Amino acid sequence: MSAFAIKMFALVCMTIDHMGAMFPDAPIWFRVVGRFSFTVFAFFIAEGCRRTSSFEKYLVRLGVLAVVSEIPYDLFFEGGGVNYFLDMNVVFTLFTGALLIYFLTKTDDLYLRLVLAICVVVIGGILGLDYGLYGVFLIVGFYYIRKKWQTALFTILMFAAKMGRYAYPVNIYTFYCFFSCISFIPILLYNGEKGKNMGGLFYIFYPLHIILLGVCNCFLTA
């Protein structure tokens, strides 16, 4: 499958997930399906870091998208005013992962790399990134891991570690983590080809679909 096809699959899964989060009567499996989307986005952020012709412009686009998307995210998911320091939208996680990769590729100093990683840990903990530090280091791992079987094993280990918190008693978060563990499956189907050009589809779709779902929810609950 091309990058375009897999990204479209991830967008559908993300939309279903957000429907499950926003609509009170939505089936619980809506949220479970959404576990596939983040791993795909994390993988292609790492791919984007490798392939972009201008890393700086790539970071700016992600950063702007994160800031802009926080407004509808907070209004419709958090149910209140805009807060950039509590339960931030997932694009901040994608941006932080890409930013860490950027800094790591600028130095060969092992100690400086360690300091940078620690800074991300501290900042990520303060800001409340979606998927937390698991998400950030998943992106960085995907950047440095190239073989598919290693990518699959890395994904399983990352989310299996998180799954340990919810293994007993079994609850919905146990299933969230389980489907996160197997979310490498779409990546295994990636053939390395770009496919159709998405253009700015993701940059437009992410905040727009939150707004549309939020407006629909307002009408349904009015």
Image (spheres, helix red, strand yellow):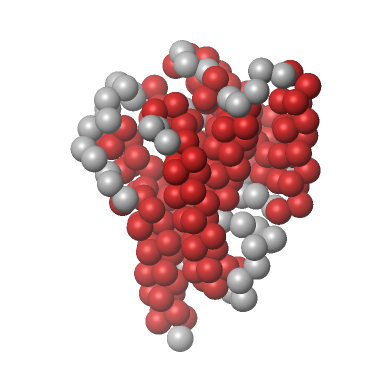
- Location of residue 187 (image quadrant): top left
> Relative to 130, is 220 on the left or the right?
left
- In this rendered view, identify the residue nearer to me: 118 or 219: 118
Q: Is residue 24 visible?
A: no
Query: In the shown orientation, is residue 102 left or right of residue 23?
Result: right
The spot of residue 179 in percent (x, y) is 52, 36
* 109 or 166, nearer to the observer: 109
- Please tell me which residue is depicted at 62% across the width and 32% down the height of the picture: 103
Query: On screen, 218 above or below 117?
Result: below
Horizontal and vertical percent position of residue 88: 61, 57
Quarter containing the C terminus = bottom left
Is the residue 47 above or below the residue 200 in the image? above
User: Seen from this angle, which residue lies furthest left?
Assistant: 196
| Residue drawn at point x = 44 percent, y = 26 percent | 50
Q: Give the residue displayed 49% in from the left and 68% down from the top.
A: 72
User: Which quarter of the figure has residue 47?
Assistant: top left
User: Residue 209's spot in the image, x, y percent?
Assistant: 38, 62
Work out whether residue 184 or residue 91 is closer to the camera in this orientation and state it.
Answer: 91
